[in-house]
Image (cartoon, rainbow, N blue to C red):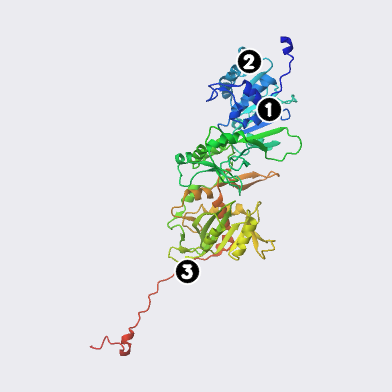
Amino acid sequence: MEALEIFKPPKKITVSEWADENRILSGKDSASPGPWRTAKTPYLRDIMDAFSNPKFQEITFVAGTQIGKTAAEQNMIGYAIDQDPGPMIVVYPTDKLGIFTAENRLKPMFNLSPALKNKFREDKSKQDELQFDEMYIAIAGANSPSNLSSRPVRYVFFDEAEKYPKWSGDEANPISLAEERTKTFWNKKKVKVSSPVLEDGVIWQSYKKADLQMEYQVPCPHCGTYQPLFFRPREKGESGGIMWPEQYTTPSEVKYTAYYQCMHCKQPIYDRQKPEMLRLGKWVVKNKNKGHASSISFHLNSIYSPWVTFGEVAEMFLKSKDTPEQLMNFINSWLAEPWKNNASELNSDLVMEKQLNYERGTMPEEAQILTLGIDVQVDHFWWGVRAWGAGLKSWLVDYGKAETWTELDEILERNFADTNGEIRKINRCGIDAGYNTDEVYLWCARHGGLCIPTKGSSRSMNTYYNTSLIDKTQINGMKLYVYDTDKMKDFIAGRLTIEAGDKGSWNVYKGIDRRYCDQVCSEQKVDVRKKNGLITQKWEKISSHAQNHMLDVETISALLAEVCGVRYLMEKEPVLYKPKPKKQNKANSWLGDTKNWLK
């Protein structure tokens, strides 16, 4: 009977099922040692099971910290050893890290698992080569070309692939070298696991190029609508994300007051509700795939982690947002998003330095034209009033968030005053028509001549803007102003290089708050390679969590300045003091001049 057991095929089992039966976490590898339970991190189930699915040859897992990506990778390795053995190579950023991981993570996993312990031949193993009954695992560093190209393998695991050197010695890219070793195996498997660093990096490009790109969605405990978890809305018109009361501004305060807001019903979601949401979650295909899918990619940020609270994510953001290096780590390691490379960035400190000595709601007397820019969101508006003078010099007068169209009407009719007390009114208003378009058109029609609908162009234009007639039966003769958003953002960036108060400067009032400055500086200019190989530059958000509402408002204000011809304004004529003539005393006028009568 024992001899027959040798020919018994392995039972059909997935990686997650195998892990639940055979994986024991060690104290060296986990804060909670003991039997593995996929139910604790249900989002890992489909990622691991993709490895046991014969149709997938390549799996990419882009993940934040404390998600369990390393444990998922180790479960795949254990499954291969026990259920479907074949020669394997595991590639780490360096040789030293590979040897350390093999000694402190892989070997304890083999020895603690009953299914693996009897197959592991530790006495025949080396530091960089682990031997088993029917296979071996080569431990290689991405910095060592000889280990990457010396043997054929069926399985390749790339651990923290984003940290690999671009070249392995004098040879090719380390990932290309290792992948070459799988050519002779029809049933090969390639697994890449890492946090991202840059958009053009290995892991992010592998994620984007996969036949299937998967997103984990969870149900709202209030309305039941499935949605991804994200830090801040990723697209215009979206809402939701991690929120906290506006009166709390310090990291320690936010840590204990932050919550998650459903992007659909806007109800608050708290940490205690997250485990059930994760349990009921499901992976959803983001891209439209045509034909047979042989590669699949998964993306998870740290907000999904059962060990991370919403408040801890918000706290980490506030601690890191003002330092580029720390913000990059937050975006890469917590949000699992790439940092934009080759950036020309605006800096919120630079905006803070543009404060002049005038009060909010007022403007210097040299201002001649007032513009109101409005950015439309799903259930509210952001607005900003900017005053303009000669030489394209400008001053922020006021800004804020409005909830209703009635509030916008009030802002439009509001009286503003210059530093001499002279009342000023809005000369021109522009409102974004990219969202709630019909409502925007009707609102502009009610304020005909004063308000214009605007829309940012998705491609570069030869001019700052152009106009087109709106084809709506209820609106006669109204024009839509389509403008080049990148040109307007270039205009703002250029004005910020001018000293506050100088000719052509872009100024803000005394006591401006950091929120405004952060939103104005939420984008950066990045290099974009076209299909023909040419490289152009384009303004993009620093990350998906960044709020850029006031930057959108200010680009509309810059458009209005062009529409109003601000660049042709002349300096105001100085008002010279002329003494008033002395009035004659009418009571004595019939006597004439009497001052010399007694002489």
Q: Is residue 523 above or below residue 194?
A: below
* Residue position for label 1: 51
Residue for point 58% across, 61% down: 562
Q: Are marks 1 and 2 in contact (CB under 8 Å)?
A: no
**Position in image of residue 63 (x %, y %):** 60, 34
**Position in image of residue 537 (x %, y %):** 62, 47
Q: Amino acid at mark 1?
A: Phe
Please state which of the two labelled residues, at mark 3 or mark 2, is closer to the viewer. Answer: 2
Q: Quadrant of the N terminus?
A: top right
Badge 3 density bin: few <14, some 14–19, many ≥20, Cα 10 Å = few
As helix, strand or loop, the secondary structure at mark 3 comes to loop
Q: Is residue 435 above or below residue 422?
A: above
Residue for point 55% across, 32% down: 306
Residue for point 69% across, 30% down: 58
Q: Are marks 3 and 2 in contact (CB under 8 Å)?
A: no
Q: Amino acid at mark 3?
A: Glu
Badge 1 density bin: few <14, some 14–19, many ≥20, Cα 10 Å = many
Q: Are marks 3 and 1 in contact (CB under 8 Å)?
A: no
Q: Marks 1/2: CA distance?
A: 21 Å
Q: Which of the two discs, 1 and 2, labels the residue nearer the N terminus? A: 1
Q: Is residue 202 above or below residue 469?
A: above
Identify the mark at residue 120; answer none if there is no mark.
2
Q: Quadrant of residue 332?
A: top right
Q: Which of the two discs, 3 and 2, labels the residue nearer the N terminus? A: 2
Q: Quadrant of residue 479?
A: bottom right
Identify the mark at residue 573; answer none if there is no mark.
3
Q: Amino acid at mark 2?
A: Phe
Q: Quadrant of the C terminus?
A: bottom left
Identify the mark at residue 174; answer none if there is no mark.
none
Q: Which of the two discs, 3 and 1, labels the residue nearer the N terminus? A: 1
Name of the residue lying farthest toward the bottom: 590
